[in-house]
Amino acid sequence: TKSTVIITGASSGLGLATAKVLADSGEWHVIMACRDFLKAERAARAVGMPKDSYTVIHCDLSSLNSVKQFVDNVRQSGRPLDVLVCNAAVYLPTAKEPRYTADGFELSVGTNHLGHFLLANMLMEDIQHKENDTNRRVIIVGSITGNTNTIAGNVPPKANLGDLRGLAGGLDGVRSSVMIDGGEFDGAKAYKDSKVCNMLTMQEMHRRFHEKTGVTFASLYPGCIATTGLFREHYQLFRTLFPPFQKYITKGYVSEEEAGKRLAQVVSDPTLNKSGVYWSWNNQSNSFENELSQEASDAEKAKKLWEISEKLVNLS
Ligand code: NDP
């Protein structure tokens, strides 16, 4: 029988490319957790995913209620869950004003971090209850841009969670700042901050659950996939110049297909089952365990982030 993987944001870019690789392998049933049902269904068909290899289930990560509804629907589908991939993200680099989730959190951190935080916590129950299986994983897609020990991660505005005072206040722009560190709104920074949260969450999950449950936790930087919808809100000039810049100057560019193969490896390759790892790939496309920046590997901060996030999504 096939294993089951949930991929959030599987309607485009990396998520779709990964869904395609896994569906084509014949070994996986892919649950596409998407906010736009029709778009996801069309995307799956357009890339030629076999009809019985996937199910689209609605999930809008910018609404905690939607996340809960999604979890209910997954449970009702009766498929035992093997792997969760937290992949969806929004990036608002040109926004002048903050936008908000249904629950009133700044949209980038609310979607990329808090939505996934609730989802991953709720689904731990479903993943760990499967016996005799060594391939149970929770993967949270990270990024180099949140990682200040790299050149890309040092392009301003840099990620910085500070003492998390804005997050503790609820990121609502009324009682607290919309930024985690309490600063002024900056859409590009909010995205990078959310990616640091993703990487910290993966490590905290590893510390809290790996030994007890045997589940593998991992994050990754798949390479710069300069052509995806992630850059849809960027200036047109940037969108024209960014792919060739990444291809020919930084040489960090990867195609959506290649990035999809990489994420699919983290889902299913038996040799990539070490927990607590942030995977990257070298120029020969070989995977290696990468180092995270000081902030993105700060265990104290991860714990604090966890405790505040639990309160915000009403888990504690
Ligand atoms: P895309 O914009 O192509 O994909 C993002 C996906 O997230 C889309 O399917 C989108 O849905 C979905 N999404 C956005 N908001 C929500 C929401 N509220 N609820 C549910 N789904 C939502 O970008 P990428 O494929 O590039 O991004 C995928 C991941 O890769 C992200 O985590 C990103 O941070 C990471 N990444 C990307 C890099 C790159 O160079 N592109 C580099 C490093 C990391 P919809 O189709 O409906 O808009």
Image: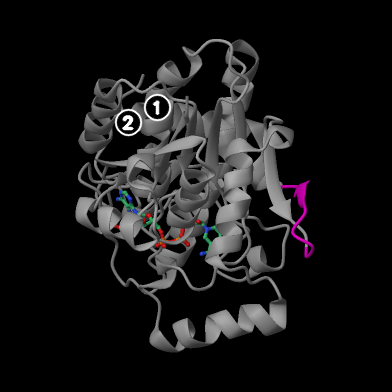
Q: Which residue is mark 1?
A: 310
Q: Is residue 153 magenta?
A: no
Is residue 285 a member of the stretch shown in magenta? yes
- In three-dimensional space, the C-alpha distance between marks 1 and 2, rounded to whole angstroms, equals 5 Å
Q: For numbered disc 1, what is the local secondary structure?
A: helix
Looking at the image, is 73 positioned above or below residue 24? above
Image mark for residue 221: none
**Residue 313: numbered disc:** 2
The relative height of residue 105 versus residue 69 in the rendered view (above or below) is below
Q: Is residue 238 left or right of residue 102?
A: right
Assign the magenta stretch its main secondary structure.
Answer: loop
Q: Position of residue 205 (x, y in %)?
A: 56, 27
Rendered location of residue 58, percent (x, y): 24, 42
Q: Is residue 108 visible?
A: yes
Q: Residues within 10 Å of mark 1 (few under 14, many from 20)?
A: some
Q: Which residues are magenta?
A: 283-293
Residue under the point 39% across and 45% down: 8
Q: Position of residue 83 (x, y in %)?
A: 50, 31
Q: Residue at x 22, y 50 (%)?
A: 37
Is there a contact, CB below 8 Å, between mark 1 and mark 2?
yes
Give the residue at x 57% y 35%: 202
Eyeballing the image, is 127 above or below 252?
above
Relative horizontal placement of residue 94, taking residue 56 as reference (left or right): right
Q: Amino acid at mark 1?
A: Glu
